[in-house]
Amino acid sequence: MNGREEIVYPGVHSDVGGGYGPGEQGRGRDDSDKLSQVPLLDMYREARKAGVPLDIKGPGIGEDVAASFAISAGLKQAFAAYVKTSENYYYAKDHGTPGLMRCHYGLYLRWRKMRLKDMRAQPSFKAAQASYPQDAADLDSANAELKEEWDDLLEVEKAGGPTVTRYAEKFAMKWVRENPKTAAFISTSLLPAAAAAELIIPGATPLTVFLGDKAVKLVQAQLQEKWEQWQQVRSDWNMGPPEAPISALYDNYMHDSRAWFKPLGDDDDVWNHKQIQELKTKQADFERAHAAWKKRADAGVPGPWQAAQGMGSATLSWGPGTGFPPEPEPRSPLTAQQADLLKRYDAAMQTARKARAAKDPSAPTDSAVLTDPKVTGGLALQTSGREFYFLWGFLRWRTVFVNGVRWDQPRVPTVQEEMEGMRIQMQRAVDMKGIGVLFQ
Protein backbone atom coordinates (compact mmCIF):
# COMPACT_ATOMS: atom_id res chain seq x y z
CA MET A 1 0.00 0.00 0.00
CA ASN A 2 1.48 3.34 -1.05
CA GLY A 3 1.82 6.14 1.49
CA ARG A 4 2.29 3.77 4.38
CA GLU A 5 5.33 3.33 6.58
CA GLU A 6 5.69 0.49 9.10
CA ILE A 7 7.93 1.03 12.10
CA VAL A 8 8.80 -1.70 14.57
CA TYR A 9 9.09 -0.68 18.23
CA PRO A 10 10.18 -2.82 21.16
CA GLY A 11 7.37 -3.44 23.62
CA VAL A 12 4.11 -5.31 24.11
CA HIS A 13 0.56 -4.16 23.37
CA SER A 14 0.07 -0.82 25.12
CA ASP A 15 3.83 -0.21 25.22
CA VAL A 16 3.40 0.76 21.58
CA GLY A 17 -0.19 1.96 21.92
CA GLY A 18 -1.87 4.05 24.57
CA GLY A 19 0.63 3.17 27.28
CA TYR A 20 0.40 1.29 30.55
CA GLY A 21 -0.02 3.30 33.72
CA PRO A 22 3.06 4.58 35.56
CA GLY A 23 4.26 2.03 38.10
CA GLU A 24 2.45 -0.94 36.55
CA GLN A 25 4.66 -4.03 36.88
CA GLY A 26 7.12 -1.70 38.61
CA ARG A 27 7.99 0.20 35.42
CA GLY A 28 8.25 3.98 35.32
CA ARG A 29 7.55 6.71 37.82
CA ASP A 30 5.27 8.95 35.73
CA ASP A 31 3.83 9.34 32.23
CA SER A 32 7.12 10.56 30.78
CA ASP A 33 8.66 7.16 31.59
CA LYS A 34 6.14 5.20 29.52
CA LEU A 35 7.69 3.34 26.60
CA SER A 36 4.65 4.36 24.54
CA GLN A 37 5.91 7.96 24.60
CA VAL A 38 8.37 7.05 21.83
CA PRO A 39 5.80 6.04 19.18
CA LEU A 40 3.53 8.85 20.39
CA LEU A 41 6.18 11.48 19.69
CA ASP A 42 7.11 9.85 16.38
CA MET A 43 3.48 9.98 15.24
CA TYR A 44 3.12 13.55 16.45
CA ARG A 45 6.24 14.59 14.57
CA GLU A 46 5.02 12.96 11.34
CA ALA A 47 1.57 14.50 11.76
CA ARG A 48 3.04 17.97 12.12
CA LYS A 49 5.23 17.45 9.04
CA ALA A 50 2.11 16.46 7.12
CA GLY A 51 0.35 19.67 8.15
CA VAL A 52 -1.92 18.46 10.94
CA PRO A 53 -2.83 21.60 12.94
CA LEU A 54 -1.94 20.33 16.41
CA ASP A 55 0.73 22.42 18.08
CA ILE A 56 1.21 21.40 21.71
CA LYS A 57 3.01 24.70 22.30
CA GLY A 58 0.36 26.77 20.56
CA PRO A 59 -2.30 29.06 22.03
CA GLY A 60 -5.17 27.48 23.89
CA ILE A 61 -3.28 24.27 24.64
CA GLY A 62 -3.29 23.50 28.34
CA GLU A 63 -0.21 22.52 30.31
CA ASP A 64 -1.65 19.07 30.95
CA VAL A 65 -1.86 18.38 27.20
CA ALA A 66 1.71 19.52 26.60
CA ALA A 67 2.89 17.46 29.58
CA SER A 68 1.33 14.32 28.12
CA PHE A 69 3.90 14.49 25.29
CA ALA A 70 6.90 14.70 27.63
CA ILE A 71 9.56 11.99 27.58
CA SER A 72 12.05 11.47 30.40
CA ALA A 73 15.78 11.77 29.85
CA GLY A 74 16.24 8.23 31.15
CA LEU A 75 13.82 6.72 28.62
CA LYS A 76 15.34 8.76 25.81
CA GLN A 77 18.81 7.50 26.60
CA ALA A 78 17.68 3.89 27.11
CA PHE A 79 15.74 3.77 23.84
CA ALA A 80 18.55 5.32 21.81
CA ALA A 81 21.05 2.84 23.26
CA TYR A 82 18.70 -0.06 22.47
CA VAL A 83 18.29 1.03 18.84
CA LYS A 84 22.02 1.47 18.33
CA THR A 85 22.86 -1.91 19.89
CA SER A 86 20.17 -3.87 18.08
CA GLU A 87 20.52 -2.41 14.59
CA ASN A 88 23.15 -4.90 13.43
CA TYR A 89 21.11 -7.95 14.43
CA TYR A 90 18.74 -7.58 11.49
CA TYR A 91 20.71 -9.40 8.79
CA ALA A 92 17.83 -10.44 6.49
CA LYS A 93 16.29 -7.11 5.49
CA ASP A 94 14.48 -8.74 2.57
CA HIS A 95 12.20 -10.37 5.15
CA GLY A 96 10.62 -6.97 5.76
CA THR A 97 8.73 -5.88 8.86
CA PRO A 98 7.79 -9.40 10.02
CA GLY A 99 11.42 -10.48 9.92
CA LEU A 100 12.42 -7.44 11.95
CA MET A 101 9.78 -8.28 14.56
CA ARG A 102 11.19 -11.78 14.91
CA CYS A 103 14.70 -10.38 15.21
CA HIS A 104 13.64 -8.32 18.23
CA TYR A 105 11.72 -11.26 19.68
CA GLY A 106 14.94 -13.25 19.57
CA LEU A 107 16.59 -10.57 21.72
CA TYR A 108 13.62 -10.71 24.07
CA LEU A 109 13.95 -14.49 24.49
CA ARG A 110 17.63 -14.13 25.36
CA TRP A 111 16.68 -11.62 28.05
CA ARG A 112 13.92 -13.89 29.38
CA LYS A 113 16.39 -16.72 29.82
CA MET A 114 18.83 -14.40 31.58
CA ARG A 115 16.15 -13.37 34.09
CA LEU A 116 14.91 -16.89 34.90
CA LYS A 117 16.97 -17.00 38.10
CA ASP A 118 17.18 -13.39 39.24
CA MET A 119 13.94 -11.64 38.27
CA ARG A 120 12.96 -11.21 41.92
CA ALA A 121 16.20 -9.27 42.52
CA GLN A 122 15.43 -6.64 39.85
CA PRO A 123 14.45 -3.14 41.05
CA SER A 124 11.33 -3.15 38.86
CA PHE A 125 10.10 -6.39 40.46
CA LYS A 126 10.68 -5.02 43.96
CA ALA A 127 8.82 -1.85 42.96
CA ALA A 128 5.88 -3.96 41.78
CA GLN A 129 5.84 -5.84 45.09
CA ALA A 130 5.64 -2.54 46.95
CA SER A 131 3.06 -0.77 44.78
CA TYR A 132 0.86 -3.55 43.40
CA PRO A 133 1.56 -7.06 44.72
CA GLN A 134 -0.67 -8.77 42.13
CA ASP A 135 1.64 -7.51 39.37
CA ALA A 136 4.60 -9.04 41.18
CA ALA A 137 2.71 -12.32 41.60
CA ASP A 138 1.90 -12.32 37.87
CA LEU A 139 5.53 -11.70 36.90
CA ASP A 140 6.84 -14.31 39.30
CA SER A 141 4.38 -17.06 38.37
CA ALA A 142 4.82 -16.42 34.63
CA ASN A 143 8.58 -16.66 35.06
CA ALA A 144 8.15 -19.96 36.91
CA GLU A 145 5.92 -21.23 34.09
CA LEU A 146 8.61 -20.29 31.56
CA LYS A 147 11.09 -22.45 33.46
CA GLU A 148 8.56 -25.31 33.42
CA GLU A 149 8.01 -24.75 29.69
CA TRP A 150 11.74 -24.97 28.96
CA ASP A 151 12.20 -28.08 31.13
CA ASP A 152 9.21 -29.68 29.43
CA LEU A 153 10.60 -29.02 25.93
CA LEU A 154 13.91 -30.60 26.93
CA GLU A 155 12.00 -33.70 28.06
CA VAL A 156 10.06 -33.73 24.79
CA GLU A 157 13.34 -33.60 22.87
CA LYS A 158 14.44 -36.79 24.63
CA ALA A 159 11.09 -38.42 23.84
CA GLY A 160 11.36 -37.51 20.16
CA GLY A 161 8.41 -35.13 20.01
CA PRO A 162 5.16 -34.17 21.77
CA THR A 163 2.01 -36.28 22.08
CA VAL A 164 -1.46 -35.52 23.41
CA THR A 165 -1.27 -38.55 25.69
CA ARG A 166 1.87 -37.22 27.36
CA TYR A 167 0.21 -33.96 28.40
CA ALA A 168 -3.08 -35.60 29.29
CA GLU A 169 -1.24 -37.83 31.75
CA LYS A 170 1.08 -35.09 33.01
CA PHE A 171 -1.59 -32.52 33.76
CA ALA A 172 -4.21 -35.04 34.86
CA MET A 173 -2.06 -35.87 37.90
CA LYS A 174 -1.71 -32.19 38.75
CA TRP A 175 -5.45 -31.68 38.35
CA VAL A 176 -6.20 -34.70 40.58
CA ARG A 177 -4.01 -33.22 43.34
CA GLU A 178 -5.79 -29.87 43.11
CA ASN A 179 -9.34 -31.31 42.77
CA PRO A 180 -9.41 -34.52 44.85
CA LYS A 181 -13.20 -34.63 45.40
CA THR A 182 -14.10 -34.19 41.73
CA ALA A 183 -11.35 -36.60 40.70
CA ALA A 184 -12.72 -39.25 43.07
CA PHE A 185 -16.16 -38.95 41.47
CA ILE A 186 -14.77 -39.20 37.95
CA SER A 187 -12.55 -42.17 38.75
CA THR A 188 -15.47 -44.19 40.15
CA SER A 189 -18.15 -43.29 37.63
CA LEU A 190 -16.70 -42.18 34.31
CA LEU A 191 -13.27 -43.75 33.85
CA PRO A 192 -14.50 -47.36 33.92
CA ALA A 193 -16.98 -46.53 31.18
CA ALA A 194 -14.26 -44.90 29.10
CA ALA A 195 -11.94 -47.85 29.62
CA ALA A 196 -14.71 -50.28 28.71
CA ALA A 197 -15.19 -48.41 25.45
CA GLU A 198 -11.90 -49.87 24.26
CA LEU A 199 -13.65 -53.25 24.11
CA ILE A 200 -16.60 -51.83 22.17
CA ILE A 201 -14.95 -49.31 19.80
CA PRO A 202 -11.88 -50.66 17.96
CA GLY A 203 -8.87 -48.43 18.60
CA ALA A 204 -10.68 -46.27 21.14
CA THR A 205 -8.90 -44.99 24.25
CA PRO A 206 -10.21 -43.17 27.31
CA LEU A 207 -8.72 -39.97 25.87
CA THR A 208 -10.56 -40.20 22.55
CA VAL A 209 -13.78 -41.17 24.34
CA PHE A 210 -13.60 -38.02 26.49
CA LEU A 211 -12.37 -35.54 23.86
CA GLY A 212 -13.33 -37.07 20.54
CA ASP A 213 -11.01 -38.02 17.71
CA LYS A 214 -11.20 -34.61 16.00
CA ALA A 215 -10.30 -32.78 19.19
CA VAL A 216 -7.32 -35.06 19.80
CA LYS A 217 -6.07 -34.50 16.24
CA LEU A 218 -6.49 -30.73 16.61
CA VAL A 219 -4.52 -30.64 19.85
CA GLN A 220 -1.82 -32.88 18.34
CA ALA A 221 -1.47 -30.50 15.39
CA GLN A 222 -1.13 -27.55 17.80
CA LEU A 223 1.48 -29.45 19.82
CA GLN A 224 3.42 -30.22 16.66
CA GLU A 225 3.39 -26.59 15.57
CA LYS A 226 4.63 -25.45 18.98
CA TRP A 227 7.34 -28.09 18.79
CA GLU A 228 8.48 -26.92 15.35
CA GLN A 229 8.54 -23.29 16.46
CA TRP A 230 10.61 -24.21 19.51
CA GLN A 231 13.17 -25.76 17.19
CA GLN A 232 13.29 -22.45 15.31
CA VAL A 233 13.65 -20.17 18.34
CA ARG A 234 16.00 -22.51 20.22
CA SER A 235 19.14 -20.96 18.69
CA ASP A 236 18.10 -17.47 19.93
CA TRP A 237 17.20 -18.88 23.36
CA ASN A 238 20.62 -20.51 23.69
CA MET A 239 22.65 -17.58 22.35
CA GLY A 240 23.45 -16.13 25.77
CA PRO A 241 22.46 -12.87 27.52
CA PRO A 242 21.92 -9.81 25.32
CA GLU A 243 24.03 -6.68 25.64
CA ALA A 244 23.40 -4.39 28.62
CA PRO A 245 21.47 -1.71 26.63
CA ILE A 246 19.04 -4.39 25.43
CA SER A 247 18.33 -5.78 28.89
CA ALA A 248 18.15 -2.28 30.42
CA LEU A 249 15.20 -1.31 28.23
CA TYR A 250 13.42 -4.59 28.94
CA ASP A 251 14.11 -4.45 32.68
CA ASN A 252 13.03 -0.89 33.27
CA TYR A 253 10.48 0.08 30.63
CA MET A 254 8.92 -2.89 28.82
CA HIS A 255 6.03 -4.87 30.29
CA ASP A 256 5.08 -8.55 30.23
CA SER A 257 1.61 -8.90 28.76
CA ARG A 258 1.54 -12.71 28.96
CA ALA A 259 2.06 -12.51 32.72
CA TRP A 260 -1.06 -10.37 32.90
CA PHE A 261 -3.32 -12.26 30.51
CA LYS A 262 -5.22 -14.98 32.36
CA PRO A 263 -7.95 -16.22 29.98
CA LEU A 264 -8.44 -19.32 32.13
CA GLY A 265 -8.59 -17.27 35.33
CA ASP A 266 -10.22 -14.03 36.45
CA ASP A 267 -9.52 -10.37 35.90
CA ASP A 268 -7.98 -8.86 39.02
CA ASP A 269 -11.15 -7.00 40.02
CA VAL A 270 -13.29 -10.13 39.62
CA TRP A 271 -10.76 -12.22 41.56
CA ASN A 272 -10.82 -9.76 44.47
CA HIS A 273 -14.60 -9.29 44.35
CA LYS A 274 -15.18 -13.03 44.71
CA GLN A 275 -13.00 -13.12 47.82
CA ILE A 276 -14.71 -10.09 49.32
CA GLN A 277 -18.14 -11.57 48.70
CA GLU A 278 -17.03 -14.81 50.36
CA LEU A 279 -15.91 -12.84 53.42
CA LYS A 280 -19.19 -10.92 53.45
CA THR A 281 -21.15 -14.17 53.28
CA LYS A 282 -19.23 -15.57 56.25
CA GLN A 283 -19.79 -12.36 58.18
CA ALA A 284 -23.52 -12.34 57.38
CA ASP A 285 -23.87 -15.98 58.50
CA PHE A 286 -22.11 -15.11 61.74
CA GLU A 287 -24.33 -12.10 62.38
CA ARG A 288 -27.47 -14.20 61.90
CA ALA A 289 -26.12 -16.89 64.22
CA HIS A 290 -25.16 -14.27 66.82
CA ALA A 291 -28.58 -12.62 66.69
CA ALA A 292 -30.28 -16.01 67.21
CA TRP A 293 -27.93 -16.79 70.11
CA LYS A 294 -28.70 -13.47 71.81
CA LYS A 295 -32.45 -14.03 71.41
CA ARG A 296 -32.19 -17.46 73.07
CA ALA A 297 -29.92 -16.19 75.82
CA ASP A 298 -32.31 -13.34 76.67
CA ALA A 299 -35.27 -15.75 76.77
CA GLY A 300 -33.42 -18.45 78.70
CA VAL A 301 -33.99 -20.94 75.85
CA PRO A 302 -31.26 -23.54 75.30
CA GLY A 303 -29.26 -23.68 72.14
CA PRO A 304 -28.98 -26.68 69.80
CA TRP A 305 -26.04 -28.14 71.72
CA GLN A 306 -27.84 -27.80 75.05
CA ALA A 307 -30.98 -29.36 73.58
CA ALA A 308 -28.99 -32.35 72.39
CA GLN A 309 -27.51 -32.74 75.88
CA GLY A 310 -30.96 -32.45 77.43
CA MET A 311 -32.39 -35.18 75.20
CA GLY A 312 -30.02 -37.62 76.82
CA SER A 313 -30.99 -36.59 80.32
CA ALA A 314 -33.66 -38.35 82.44
CA THR A 315 -35.21 -35.01 83.35
CA LEU A 316 -36.06 -32.38 80.76
CA SER A 317 -36.23 -28.88 82.16
CA TRP A 318 -34.97 -25.56 80.89
CA GLY A 319 -34.23 -22.20 82.28
CA PRO A 320 -32.08 -20.95 85.13
CA GLY A 321 -30.99 -23.53 87.66
CA THR A 322 -31.28 -26.52 85.35
CA GLY A 323 -27.56 -27.22 85.61
CA PHE A 324 -26.76 -26.78 81.91
CA PRO A 325 -23.77 -24.55 81.10
CA PRO A 326 -24.59 -21.37 79.20
CA GLU A 327 -24.53 -21.62 75.40
CA PRO A 328 -21.19 -20.22 74.18
CA GLU A 329 -21.41 -16.95 72.29
CA PRO A 330 -20.65 -17.38 68.56
CA ARG A 331 -17.43 -15.82 67.37
CA SER A 332 -16.81 -14.20 64.02
CA PRO A 333 -14.96 -16.49 61.57
CA LEU A 334 -13.09 -13.48 60.21
CA THR A 335 -9.67 -12.48 61.41
CA ALA A 336 -9.09 -8.93 62.57
CA GLN A 337 -7.27 -8.27 59.29
CA GLN A 338 -10.21 -9.55 57.24
CA ALA A 339 -12.72 -7.52 59.24
CA ASP A 340 -10.61 -4.40 58.72
CA LEU A 341 -10.37 -5.14 54.99
CA LEU A 342 -14.17 -5.24 54.69
CA LYS A 343 -14.44 -1.91 56.50
CA ARG A 344 -11.90 -0.35 54.13
CA TYR A 345 -13.70 -1.79 51.11
CA ASP A 346 -17.17 -0.60 52.19
CA ALA A 347 -15.87 2.87 52.98
CA ALA A 348 -13.97 3.15 49.67
CA MET A 349 -16.97 1.95 47.64
CA GLN A 350 -19.29 4.39 49.40
CA THR A 351 -16.89 7.29 48.76
CA ALA A 352 -16.47 6.33 45.09
CA ARG A 353 -20.21 6.08 44.47
CA LYS A 354 -20.87 9.44 46.12
CA ALA A 355 -18.16 11.01 43.95
CA ARG A 356 -19.67 9.51 40.80
CA ALA A 357 -23.13 10.71 41.80
CA ALA A 358 -21.66 14.21 42.17
CA LYS A 359 -20.19 13.94 38.62
CA ASP A 360 -16.62 14.14 39.91
CA PRO A 361 -14.43 13.32 36.87
CA SER A 362 -11.74 11.85 39.12
CA ALA A 363 -14.15 9.45 40.85
CA PRO A 364 -12.82 5.87 40.75
CA THR A 365 -14.80 3.05 39.18
CA ASP A 366 -15.79 -0.03 41.16
CA SER A 367 -13.05 -1.88 39.30
CA ALA A 368 -10.47 0.69 40.39
CA VAL A 369 -11.51 0.29 44.02
CA LEU A 370 -11.32 -3.50 43.75
CA THR A 371 -7.78 -3.34 42.38
CA ASP A 372 -6.46 -0.71 44.79
CA PRO A 373 -3.90 -2.43 47.08
CA LYS A 374 -4.69 0.12 49.80
CA VAL A 375 -8.22 -1.27 49.86
CA THR A 376 -7.77 -4.95 49.03
CA GLY A 377 -4.32 -5.59 50.47
CA GLY A 378 -4.40 -8.88 52.37
CA LEU A 379 -6.50 -10.83 49.87
CA ALA A 380 -5.01 -13.93 48.23
CA LEU A 381 -3.17 -13.22 44.98
CA GLN A 382 -3.96 -15.05 41.74
CA THR A 383 -0.99 -17.05 40.44
CA SER A 384 -2.52 -19.04 37.58
CA GLY A 385 -5.02 -18.79 34.75
CA ARG A 386 -2.70 -18.27 31.78
CA GLU A 387 -3.01 -20.27 28.55
CA PHE A 388 -1.31 -23.69 28.52
CA TYR A 389 2.40 -23.26 27.99
CA PHE A 390 2.77 -26.59 26.19
CA LEU A 391 0.50 -25.29 23.40
CA TRP A 392 1.52 -21.62 23.40
CA GLY A 393 3.81 -20.10 26.02
CA PHE A 394 6.90 -17.95 25.48
CA LEU A 395 9.14 -20.31 23.51
CA ARG A 396 7.58 -19.88 20.10
CA TRP A 397 7.19 -17.16 17.51
CA ARG A 398 4.47 -14.57 17.98
CA THR A 399 2.11 -14.95 15.02
CA VAL A 400 2.43 -12.23 12.37
CA PHE A 401 -0.10 -11.59 9.61
CA VAL A 402 0.62 -9.79 6.34
CA ASN A 403 -2.48 -8.65 4.44
CA GLY A 404 -4.57 -11.08 6.47
CA VAL A 405 -2.31 -14.05 5.74
CA ARG A 406 -0.07 -15.66 8.33
CA TRP A 407 3.61 -14.95 7.64
CA ASP A 408 6.22 -17.66 8.13
CA GLN A 409 9.88 -16.74 8.02
CA PRO A 410 11.70 -18.12 4.96
CA ARG A 411 14.08 -20.93 5.78
CA VAL A 412 17.62 -19.60 6.23
CA PRO A 413 20.29 -22.33 5.82
CA THR A 414 22.92 -22.62 8.54
CA VAL A 415 26.63 -22.24 7.71
CA GLN A 416 27.03 -26.01 8.04
CA GLU A 417 24.14 -26.62 5.63
CA GLU A 418 25.62 -24.20 3.09
CA MET A 419 29.02 -25.93 3.28
CA GLU A 420 27.39 -29.33 2.86
CA GLY A 421 25.52 -28.01 -0.18
CA MET A 422 28.77 -26.80 -1.75
CA ARG A 423 30.36 -30.20 -1.10
CA ILE A 424 27.48 -32.00 -2.81
CA GLN A 425 27.68 -29.67 -5.83
CA MET A 426 31.42 -30.27 -6.15
CA GLN A 427 30.93 -34.02 -5.88
CA ARG A 428 28.33 -33.96 -8.65
CA ALA A 429 30.66 -31.94 -10.88
CA VAL A 430 33.46 -34.46 -10.33
CA ASP A 431 31.11 -37.35 -11.04
CA MET A 432 30.01 -35.78 -14.34
CA LYS A 433 33.28 -34.24 -15.65
CA GLY A 434 36.04 -35.91 -13.71
CA ILE A 435 38.56 -34.69 -11.13
CA GLY A 436 39.98 -32.14 -13.53
CA VAL A 437 36.95 -29.94 -13.08
CA LEU A 438 38.33 -28.87 -9.72
CA PHE A 439 41.37 -27.26 -11.35
CA GLN A 440 39.60 -25.33 -14.07
Image (cartoon, helix red, strand yellow):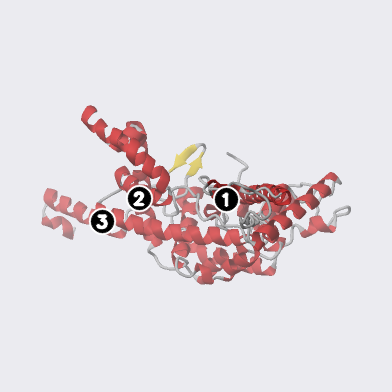
- Residue 309, image x, y percentages: 55, 50
Q: Residues within 10 Å of mark 2 (few under 14, many from 20)?
A: few
Query: Hey, which quadrant is residue 191 in on the image?
Result: top left
Q: Is residue 66 visible?
A: yes
Decide if residue 202 is in sight here.
no
Relative to 164, does residue 252 appear above or below in the rendering? below
Label whose residue precedes the other's in the sequence (3 or 1): 3
Could you say whether the residue bearing mark 2 is in a helix, strand or loop? helix
Q: Amino acid at mark 2?
A: Met
Left or right of 229: which side holds 120? right
Callout 3: helix, strand or loop?
helix
| Residue marked by disc 1 | 305
Labels 1 & 2 near each other (Cβ < 8 A): no
Q: Amino acid at mark 3?
A: Lys
Residue linked to disc 2:
173
Residue under the point 30% across and 34% down: 194
Say the numbered circle drawn on residue 158.
3
Q: Position of residue 2 (x, y in %)?
A: 60, 40
Q: Secondary structure at mark 1?
A: helix
Disc 1 marks a residue whose amino acid type is Trp
